[in-house]
Amino acid sequence: MVEEFAFDNAEERRKVRQNDGGWIEVIAGSMFSGKSEELIRRLTRARIARQKVQVFKPGIDARYSVEEIASHSGQKHISLPVNSTSEMMEQVMPDTEVIGIDEAQFFDMEIIAAVNSLAEMGKRVIIAGLDQDYMGKPFEPMPQLLSIAEFITKTHAICVRCGATANYSQRTVESEARVEVGASDKYEARCRKCFVPHADAPTPL
């Protein structure tokens, strides 16, 4: 479930661009909530508008494709895998107007200053990522990115246990590592009531 994004309103776009400045948009939520799908939708609209688009993803995320960002529903968009923020910045072209960044929680903390710099250069930066880790704690650098964004969209999934609105990513395998890349093989979407903040959580009674 994705909240309607105000930027699709032409009047809002005119106000934001009145000084020809850039800005930051953050799409945050749990796994299976449609973050990447919403990111792809916005990037596709930018390309239709004949804007120069570049998309980046962390090299660690190769679940569905090495050189594409992909949603759990199967939508894809070409992207460049990078291993650090500095590597991403080296590949940003001067004439790029829109920059997409997927799985931002896997980037280093330098991403905060980097996207601020890109926005100050007049670029539209669209970021998607998990706002909480498998323990339900803020997943850096997402909290910092949310604080500097002009626009924020919170996405939600459906709890696989009870069907309520899900805001948590439940890890279902034995691992205490904070970064454990996976999809439905390792995670489930859970609501607050059904979420248990540790690995391999039992089914709630």
Image: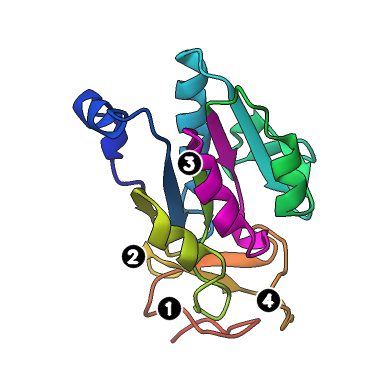
CA gap, disc 2 to disc 1? Answer: 9 Å
Q: Earlier in the sequence, mark 4 or mark 1?
A: 4
Disc number for residue 178: 4
- Please say whether residue 110 is one of the residues in the magenta stretch: yes
The numbered dot on residue 119 is 3
Question: To which residue does mark 1 refer?
Answer: 194
Residue 125 showing in the rendered view: no
Viewer-proximal residue among 199 and 109: 109
Identified by mark 2, the residue type is: Ala
- Tag 3: residue type? Ala
Q: CA distance from mark 3 to mark 1?
A: 39 Å
Quick check: is 164 in the magenta stretch?
A: no
Which residue does the image show at 68% across and 34% down from the upper left? Answer: 92
Instruction: Kindly state the secondary structure of the residue where label 3 is placed.
Output: helix
Tell me the magenta residue range: 98-125
Q: Are marks 3 and 1 in contact (CB under 8 Å)?
A: no
Indicate the position of residue 50 as horizontal and vertical percent values: 50, 12
Q: Residue at x 19, y 26 (%)?
A: 11
Counting residues from the N terminus, which is met first, the one under dot 2 or under dot 4?
2
* Residue 174 pos. (x, y %): 73, 81
Q: Nearer the viewer, mark 4 or mark 3?
A: 3
Tell me if 193 is positioned left or right of 6 in this view. Answer: right
Asked whether the residues under the numbered discs 2 and 1 touch, taking CB atoms below 8 Å apart as contact, a structural biologist would say yes
* Residue 143, x across and y down, in percent: 46, 67
Q: Which residue is mark 2?
A: 164
For the point 42% across and 36% down, the residue is 22
Mark 2 or 4: the one toward you: 4
